[in-house]
Image (cartoon, helix red, strand yellow):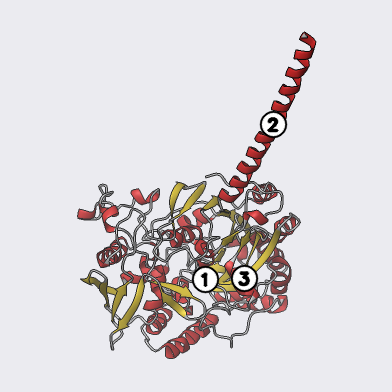
């Protein structure tokens, strides 16, 4: 009897165990399906270090990307129609071109829930004008005042004619007045203290599609989707999170992508690094023209680069075919401003590699035969390995005609400091400067007007009164066609002075997980449409689409 009872109990236990296993398996399947449906959609994008997200202070590629996703501007850059409405749904311009009356979109919410009104717009403009840093240069010399007309209407009056003013407003980002005023500390701005600058190091006061989840200035910036964004989320596949990772180190990037922990790279990886990334599953290489000229700046106030014949000699020492075909493939030649910039002058003849002409120019220089008394350095940014190749190529070619070049590895942070003074600015350096709004005037003023001296955007210290006057006259011209003609004339004059070796319009080459994200700039190119040349705007993350369910292995889900 005991044996029979034992057999019955064993049979029952086995059935219960089988049932338990089936139930657990079903639960795991259901939980797995639920996880797939709830999986966080994110983009991990490596950029350079040094995040500064204060719109009135920052000026640079990495910071600009963060800012334009955290804040809204009155208008949005559109490569096919200059600008389109954003926070400003409409505007009127006075007959003399100096008074702009804007109507705001009503009901826009800041990230903390406050409504964005004309008072915030006026406060933001006054903050730009008072601090006078970063993109504030576009307004400090041009804006007379901003005033509230009613809750959703305001006026900006200029103190002088400024033809591209509307285009420049893509860099005027609106901050929450109440938030800033609630977080001011002691500082140099009177009743406004530090104007919230310290608080804005790690916080945002914006209304943009994303808000700050976490920031570590030398490591990463984590953006979180703002679900109540005023313009809505028609794009259901927009990323919930974007992690901007502060590194451009090729080995780190290769490791992250091979683990499925990176979806989009910076545009400065070498051709060799990109070729290696291209071998990974789901990875493609995209090439975009973004209006960014790559140039060798000469310090025109320091010998021997203060002499035009010495500069021209080095201009003929560059093997441009090697740059275009081998070092930076897909990058067209650039002369003064890139060919993809509105008002580019197509009539200027690019320099060519010609050592005979180089030697001929060098012999005209007062430094000929005395170059050993004048050390010449060429600095390049270590973040951009292809620039080292250009520097070494020029060094080798110049040596053939007796010019000794010391190539120096540097960094953008160092450039920003040493270029503040003539004495500390190197005799030459390789740099790329992108337009701040979509006209040649943006580059001409930030690159060659005397007011830009002392910034990382002008290593030439040109300080030429005639060039200054020509730039000022062009910017003050309201008629677009006439203004563009004046831009052509400025380019011709700069070509004669040759303060710069104009290399190429540097193509942004980046690796991305095409099985995981849809990059709107890449898709536009496939359709024959132009890229957005205003710095950073190709990375407006709200327009990206994320499809983690299509990701090939390896893929590591994002965890905020």
Near mark 2 (Cα within 10 A), the count class, few <14, some 14-19 or many ≥20, is few
Mark closest to the chain's N terminus, 2 or 3: 2
| Residue nearer the viewer, 216 or 322 | 216
Q: Is residue 286 left or right of residue 112?
A: right
Residue at screen point 50% across, 86% down:
488
Could you say which quadrant of the image residue 472 lies in?
bottom left
Callout 3 secondary element: helix
Tag in front: 1 or 3? 3
Tag in front: 2 or 1? 2
| Residue nearer the viewer, 89 or 521 | 89
Could you say which quadrant of the image residue 178 lies in?
bottom left
Q: Position of residue 314 (x, y in %)?
A: 63, 71
Q: Position of residue 404 (x, y in %)?
A: 66, 62
Mark closest to the chain's N terminus, 1 or 3: 1
Q: Are the residues flagged by discs 2 and 3 in contact, CB closer than 8 Å?
A: no
Cα separation between marks 2 and 3: 51 Å
Callout 2 secondary element: helix
Callout 1 secondary element: loop
Residue at screen point 54% across, 82% down:
344
**Residue that lies at the very extreme toward the top in this rendered image:** 2
Q: Position of residue 181 (x, y in %)?
A: 25, 53
Tell me if residue 364 can be seen: yes
Which mark is drawn over residue 19?
A: 2
Tell me if residue 505 can be seen: no
Residue linked to disc 3: 523
Which mark is drawn over residue 306?
A: 1
């Amino acid at each position: 009897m005991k044996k029979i009872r034992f057999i019955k109990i064993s049979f029952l236990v086995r059935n219960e165990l089988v049932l338990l296993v089936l139930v657990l398996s079903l639960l795991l399947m259901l939980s797995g399906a639920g996880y797939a449906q709830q999986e966080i959609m994110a983009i991990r994008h490596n950029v350079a270090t040094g995040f500064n997200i204060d719109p009135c202070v920052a000026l640079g590629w990495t910071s600009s990307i963060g800012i334009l996703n955290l804040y809204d501007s009155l208008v949005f850059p559109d490569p096919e129609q200059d600008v389109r409405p954003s926070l400003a749904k409409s505007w009127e311009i006075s007959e003399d071109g100096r008074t702009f009356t804007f109507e705001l979109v009503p009901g826009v919410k800041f990230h903390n829930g406050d409504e964005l009104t004309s008072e915030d717009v006026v406060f933001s403009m006054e903050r730009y004008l008072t601090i006078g840093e970063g993109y504030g240069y576009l307004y400090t010399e041009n804006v007379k005042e901003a005033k509230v007309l009613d809750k959703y209407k305001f006026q900006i009056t200029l103190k002088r004619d400024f033809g591209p003013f509307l285009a420049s407003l893509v860099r005027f980002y609106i901050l929450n007045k109440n938030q800033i005023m609630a977080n001011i500390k002691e500082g140099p701005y009177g009743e406004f203290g530090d104007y919230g600058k310290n608080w804005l190091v790690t916080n945002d006061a914006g209304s943009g599609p994303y808000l700050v989840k976490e920031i570590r200035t030398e490591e990463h910036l984590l953006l979180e989707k703002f679900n109540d964004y005023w313009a809505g989320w028609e794009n259901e596949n927009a990323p919930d999170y974007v992690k901007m990772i502060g590194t451009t180190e090729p080995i780190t990037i290769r490791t992250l992508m091979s683990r499925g922990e990176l979806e989009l790279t910076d545009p400065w990886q070498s051709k060799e690094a990109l070729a290696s990334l291209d071998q990974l599953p789901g990875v493609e290489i995209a090439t975009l023209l973004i209006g960014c000229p790559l140039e060798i700046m000469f310090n025109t106030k320091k010998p021997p680069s203060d002499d035009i014949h010495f500069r021209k000699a080095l201009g003929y020492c560059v093997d441009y075919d090697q740059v275009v075909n081998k070092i930076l493939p897909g990058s067209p030649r650039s002369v003064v401003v890139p060919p993809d910039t509105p008002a580019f002058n197509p009539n200027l003849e690019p320099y060519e590699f010609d050592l005979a002409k180089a030697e001929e120019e060098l012999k005209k220089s007062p430094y000929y035969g005395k170059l050993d008394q004048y050390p010449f350095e060429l600095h390049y940014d270590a973040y951009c390995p292809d620039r080292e190749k250009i520097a070494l190529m020029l060094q080798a070619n110049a040596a053939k005609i007796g010019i000794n070049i010391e190539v120096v590895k540097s960094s953008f942070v160092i450039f920003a400091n040493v270029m503040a003074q003539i004495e500390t600015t190197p005799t030459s350096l390789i740099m790329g400067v992108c337009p701040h709004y979509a006209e040649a005037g943006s580059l001409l003023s930030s690159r060659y007007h005397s007011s830009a001296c002392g910034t990382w955007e002008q290593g030439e210290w040109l300080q030429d009164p005639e060039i200054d006057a020509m730039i000022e006259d062009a910017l003050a011209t309201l008629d677009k066609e006439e203004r563009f003609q004046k831009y052509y004339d400025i380019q011709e004059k700069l070509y004669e002075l040759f303060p710069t070796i104009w290399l190429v319009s540097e193509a942004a080459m980046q690796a991305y997980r095409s099985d995981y994200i849809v990059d709107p700039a890449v898709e536009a190119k496939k359709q024959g449409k132009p890229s957005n040349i205003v710095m950073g705007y190709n990375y407006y993350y709200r327009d990206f689409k994320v499809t983690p369910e299509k990701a090939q292995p390896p893929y590591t889900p994002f965890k905020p």
